[in-house]
Amino acid sequence: MRIAIDYTAAVQQRAGIGRYTRELVGALLNLEEAREAHRYTLFAAAGGGHTPAGDLPPAVRCRFLPLSDEWAARLWHRVRLPIPVETFTGPIDLFYSPDFVLPPTRRRTRTLLTVHDLSFLRYPDHFVPKLVRYLSRVVPESVARADRVLADSEATRADLVELLGTPPEKVEVLYSGVDARFRPEGEPGEQERLRARYGLDRPYVLSVGTLQPRKNYVRLIRAFARLSMSGLMLVIAGARGWLYEEVLEEATRHGDRVRILGFVEEEDLPALYRNAVLFVFPSFYEGFGLPVLEAMACGVPVVCSCASSLPEVAGDAALLVDPQDEEGLRGAMGRALEDDSLRREMTARGLARAAAFTWERAARQLFAAFAAFHT
């Protein structure tokens, strides 16, 4: 088959769906059977830029739309300009979007769509209204038009059925993976690098994710501040998203006990996880929650929310807490920090749990999803 993959997020976004797309597509193109079975076009509304690491195999080509992703969204989804994506990709049999929405396609082109979460419907007050209005229109339209839908978790699959009325048989769960660079073994000089780049010169509790209300950082900061342990920092790594002002204000109230690092380069993430004494992820809602598994793969005990997909992802390897319960969050952090026997058990369970999620496994499932259109 001739398959086009929307690679825009991989080009435009360093974290989140951008990293998801790079990891999944890279793993797919590493599969010999996938390269031999189909011809691929990586399409991006970006005007040029990031392609998968290394030389592309002969079965893969890139096509870049000389517009930004913002302008492409305006033309396709706001103005509704009916220019099919095949105008830029050339003739295709299947179009796969790993990022919530589908561009216009010709009638005979089959479509596959990944929906990571429906947080904008579950928690609309956690988003700016303009974004909620946009997503509430284009995502349901794309889900309804797609021939098949991939969800990040059973929780997201259930939301698609409940909130959008998607037929259950139309949705398949495809779990993310953990890259092999997330491992317990450190690299020479990494502690010195973290100290020099980020000023991390004391033991720290870590959380990773974009600054936005859904991540529940304000409650995390308040719960951490109530811990009686001295000499311990809370470190939050993530770019500024939206409605983050309260997070910054709360952090400043606690001086050097709380550090907001901003975006951290991918090359530093494994070391940042490995050198933490605890990872905490108290989010109100996650479609998957990959940082939980990445922390586990690095041998770090995890405390996380019991909401949405997180119990499904964490299994029995984390301490789960109600994201609304500040005292419960403080207590769980205290237990994980003080009980050495519990820490060893959590670390062992976390390593085993993370090992079950690989990008190769995800890529093989995606390849099988492609093959289903060929039958």
Image (spheres, grey):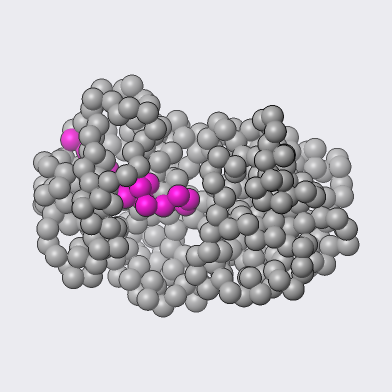
207 in magenta: no
Find residue 296 and report its horizontal and vertical position in percent.
66, 41
Which residue: 53% across, 43% down? 266
- On the picture, is 102 further left or further right than 274? left
Which residue: 59% across, 43% down? 269
- On the picture, is 58 further left or further right than 242? left
Which residue: 44% across, 45% down? 20
- On the picture, is 79 further left or further right than 322? left
Establish if 93 lies above or below 55: below
14 in magenta: yes
Find residue 144 and report its horizontal and vertical position in percent.
26, 60
Looking at this rendering, what residue extends furthest in the front direction?
Answer: 196
Q: Quadrant of the C terminus?
A: top left
- Which one is nearer the viewer's eye here, 20 or 50? 50
- Which one is nearer the viewer's eye here, 179 or 307? 179
Q: In the figure, residue 270 lies in which quadrant?
A: top right
- Which one is nearer the viewer's eye here, 121 or 105? 105
- On the picture, is 326 further left or further right than 68? right
Establish if 67 lies above or below 92: below
Range of magenta residues:
2-17
Find residue 233 and report its horizontal and vertical position in percent.
77, 57
